[in-house]
Image (cartoon, rainbow, N blue to C red):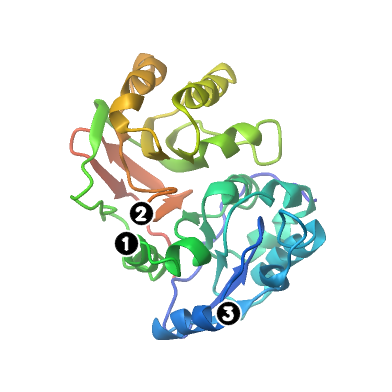
Amino acid sequence: MKCVEPVVARLPKALQAGACLAVVAPAGPARLDLEKARQWFAQRGYRCRFYPSVEQTEGYLAGSDEQRAQDLHEAFADPAIDAILCMRGGYGSMRVLDRLDFELIGRHPKPLIGYSDITALHTALQRHAGLITFHGGMLNADLLGGKAEPTESSLLQQLSGQVGEGAQIAHPAAWPLTQVCPGAASGVLLGGNLSMLGATMGTVAEVELDGSILFIEDVNEPLYRVDRLLTQLRLAGKLEQVNGVLVGDFAGITVQAMTPLLRAIFGPLDIPVLAGWRSGHCDPNLCLPLGARVRLDSAAKTLTLQQDLFGV
């Protein structure tokens, strides 16, 4: 692994008609209908390339660590590839972190899309390659799995550059948001799956949250374990300089049930906290640009981009 100092990478180009998306499997395996996937891309005006890990299985992993890391390197380095879409989560992204060449990846900035276990890649690439990555729907469960709108449109609109500086990241009115703590603040949107944020502490993917808007989501975690994970971040000093918190979906835990815990953890910090955002292991699953500067207003219940996501 080559570990370099954090850099600000040049922004990639937005996806155009005919763009080619790499499909990789950095974590767990799945049975993917390749023809159905090709048709999905073609119907939206894109091309696709499947990397070897997509069709491999080694127990609970999509092929060897070497293969999964190689797929990422090749997809980033290939000038014919415009974006990189993860097939699924599961487990395994952490195992490739010490094999990644962040200097190489930083020289070829491209959107990486995924969530859940892919959080380890999000935090590592933001910290060591200066990339904006996208916490959004993956191919197998989300895009081919029939998740409700705006799962697909929120992803494709951001990737195609339709959401730029000054635009609000839309949230469907059918799922009301909850102001947990009042206020408004700006910062770089960072985070992802809360369990992965805890698991990567002390590693090359440990998230640096100073001046950030922290985003968290999770699945199959009872409330006491969410408490433990947030307390771990607090005791590690990770929350002291957070400017605001956006709480995504915690499957199985209602916002009402989480509110006392969120107020206990974040209330003393006097920062805005907005909960109920439909991103994570939920339907619909909205896209968020991690590594981008945003403004969170918990009273207005808005999240506004303060920069463009792509270069010219």
Q: Position of residue 183 (x, y in %)?
A: 25, 28
Identify the residue shown where x is 30% and y is 63%.
149
Image position of 280 (left or right of 209) = left
Q: Nearer the viewer, residue 207 or 185?
A: 207
| Residue on which the image places disc 3 | 34
Please tell me whether residue 140 is drawn above or below residue 264 in the rendered image: below
The quarter of the picture where residue 300 lies is top left
Report the number of discs: 3
Image quadrant in which you'd find residue 57: bottom right
Mark 3 vs mark 1, CA separation in Å:
22 Å
| Residue 122 visible within the image | no
Label 3 to label 2: alpha-carbon separation? 23 Å
138 lies left or right of 96 = left
- How many C-alpha atoms fall within 10 Å of the one at disc 2: few (<14), some, or many (≥20)? some
Task: Give me the residue at 52% from left, 19% from top.
Answer: 231
Secondary element under disc 2, as helix, strand or loop, is loop
Query: Which one is nearer the viewer's eye here, 211 or 145?
Result: 145
Mark 1 to mark 2: distance in Å?
A: 6 Å
Q: Name the residue under label 1.
A: 148
Disc 3 marks a residue whose amino acid type is: Leu
Circle number at residue 283: 2
105 relative to 177 in the view: left or right: right
The earlier-in-sequence mark between 1 and 2 is 1
At label 1, the amino acid type is Ala
N-term-proximal mark, 3 vs 1? 3
Q: Contact, CB < 8 Å: mark 1 with mark 2?
A: yes
